[in-house]
Structure formats: structure tokens, C-alpha cells
Image: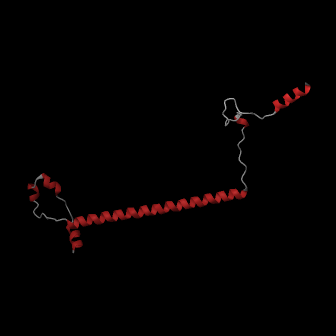
Amino acid sequence: MAKKKEKAVEVKTDNTRGLPKSGKFWKGPKEKFRKIQNTLPKKTTQQHLKLRDDLRKIKALSKSIKEEKKNENELKKQRREENAKRREENELKNQQVQIITNTSKLKRIKKKQLRQIQKRDLDNLKAKVV
């Protein structure tokens, strides 16, 4: 009988476990957080240098892409400004202008018409038309 007791003691010291009583086979035995050691192996110098080199290349590539986008946006902005300026000039050329030489007419004109009157430098307009 002494032999049977020894075997029982040996089984108790063994860490093997069967299925949990709940039947949840995916759940392992719980451990204290401080006992869990999830440390990654240290990288070699070659791996470290390769990683740094890759990061430098990625940064340079992203910087060049940003510069290209910035240049494209500047060109678009410049084109928009030029088009707006050209459109404005074309509108001025297309307008029919009636010059008021008699300034006393301005006193008799209705307020609504006075609001539409614009002062312009006609010398520049004539030079562009000719």
C-alpha cells in the first residue's frame, strides 16, 4: 500500500491538466500578470540598421510626394488666378460704356441709377482696345 501512496503524490506534482469542468477548452490556466513574460528577442545590429534605412527611405518618399502635391496645388492656384483675371478683363472689354460728360445730369438721376454708375479710368481701356 505504501507504493500506491507514492504514485498519488507523483500525480499531484505533475502540472498536466485535463479539460476544464465548464467544457471551455480554449481557456488556459490563469496566471498572475507579473509572472507572464512577453519579451521579444533583441534585434541584431544588421536588423536595426536595415530598419533605420527603411524608415529613412519611407520618410524621403513621403516628403517627395508631399512636395509634388504642394507644387501641383500652387500651379492650380496660379491658373485659377490667371483665369479669373482674364475673365474680368474680357468682361470689361465686352461692356458697353456710356460716358457722362455733363456732370449736372448726375444730380437729376434717380438713386437706383446712381448706384449702377461706376468711375473708371478710360485711358487704360482705350490703350488696350487699340
Residue at position x 50%, y 59% in the image: 66
Residue 62 higher or lower than 18, as above or below: below
Residue 3 placement: quadrant: top right
- The x and y percentages for residue 121 are 21, 65
- The x and y percentages for residue 63 are 53, 60
Query: Which of the pair 115/66 is nearer the observer?
Result: 66
Image mark count: 0
- The x and y percentages for residue 71 are 45, 63
Query: Which of the pair 9/92 is nearer the observer?
Result: 9
Residue at position x 60%, y 61% in the image: 57
- The x and y percentages for residue 101 are 11, 64
Outermost residue toward the top in this view: 1
Asked if residue 1 lies left or right of residue 19, the reply is right
> Which color scheme did the rendering employ for the protein?
secondary structure
The quadrant the N terminus occupies is top right
Residue at position x 73%, y 55% in the image: 44
